[in-house]
Image: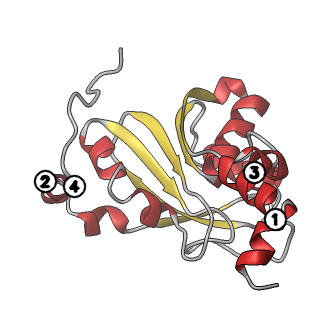
Amino acid sequence: MLPNRPRRIIPAQQQAEEIPMGALAQGRFVTLPDGLRLHYIEAGEGEPVVFIHGSGPGASGHGNFKQNYPTFASFGYRVIVPDLPGYGASDKPETTYSLDFFVGALAGLLDALDIQRCVLVGNSLGGAIAIKLALDAPQRVSRLVLMAPGGLMEKEQYYLQMEGIQKMGAAFANGELNDAAGM
């Protein structure tokens, strides 16, 4: 049983009053041995919980988890909220942004912060990164929290199994879409 584990959900307005958001949004930087400079937010003390954001325009750790990590910090967890390489205030090197690249950067951040074992919370791309790190180094991950994680299926397999895509494909094959478009 974890000490100080949240027992109730705190509305966003109330948590913002309990912990000033501006105080937590101030970030730090760490330079990894390969020269990659990562931005991260750190707050609280206790068991480390690392929040890994998803991708997309304007994605960042704080932007993705600003309504979540303050509550965890207030309940006695050490929260780490990095900006992945290529996002937020972290470096944006010209390289291939593969899953292994992101996992290596996250492992480097954990090493730099002397985090041997932690909870990983991953959203979308962050979920895929969390899964891969857990598979590559299970001793480093105490728990996984996955929110719509990427990487569980090949994109093509996933899309082709979606009911809407199947209906659209059938309608196109039957000529229904051409008729609707006046073709």
Q: For the residues carrying marks 2 and 1, which lies nearer the camera in this image?
A: 1
Please give the residue where the numbered disc 2 appears in the rendered image: 14
Cβ–Cβ under 8 Å for marks 2 and 1: no
Cβ–Cβ under 8 Å for marks 2 and 4: yes
Dot 4 alpha-carbon crowd within 10 angstroms: few under 14, some 14 to 19, many 20 or more: some
Tell me the kind of residue under disc 1.
Phe
Q: For the residues carrying marks 4 and 1, which lies nearer the camera in this image?
A: 1
State which tag comes first along the sequence, 3 or 1.
3
Q: Secondary structure at mark 3?
A: helix
Instruction: Identify the residue at horizontal 81%, vertical 65% (top origin).
Output: 172
Instruction: Identify the residue at horizontal 69%, vertical 37% (top origin).
Output: 131
Point out the residue furthest to the bottom here: 182
Cβ–Cβ under 8 Å for marks 3 and 2: no
Measured in 3D between alpha carbons, the distance from the residue under mark 3 to the one under mark 1, in whole angstroms, is: 10 Å
Question: As drawn, is 23 to the left or to the right of 29?
Answer: left
Dot 3 alpha-carbon crowd within 10 angstroms: few under 14, some 14 to 19, many 20 or more: few
Measured in 3D between alpha carbons, the distance from the residue under mark 4 to the one under mark 3, in whole angstroms, is: 39 Å
Q: Secondary structure at mark 1?
A: helix
State which tag comes first along the sequence, 4 or 1.
4
* Residue 125 in the image, given as x and y percentages of width and height: 65, 54
Tell me the kind of residue under disc 3.
Gln
Using the image, tell me which numbered label, if any, was put on residue 166: 3
Measured in 3D between alpha carbons, the distance from the residue under mark 4 to the one under mark 1, in whole angstroms, is: 45 Å
Of 76 and 128, nearer the camera is 128
Q: Compared with residue 114, is residue 59 higher up or lower down, i.e. above or below?
A: below
Point out the residue furthest to the top here: 1
Using the image, tell me which numbered label, if any, was put on residue 172: 1
Please give the residue where the numbered disc 4 appears in the rendered image: 12
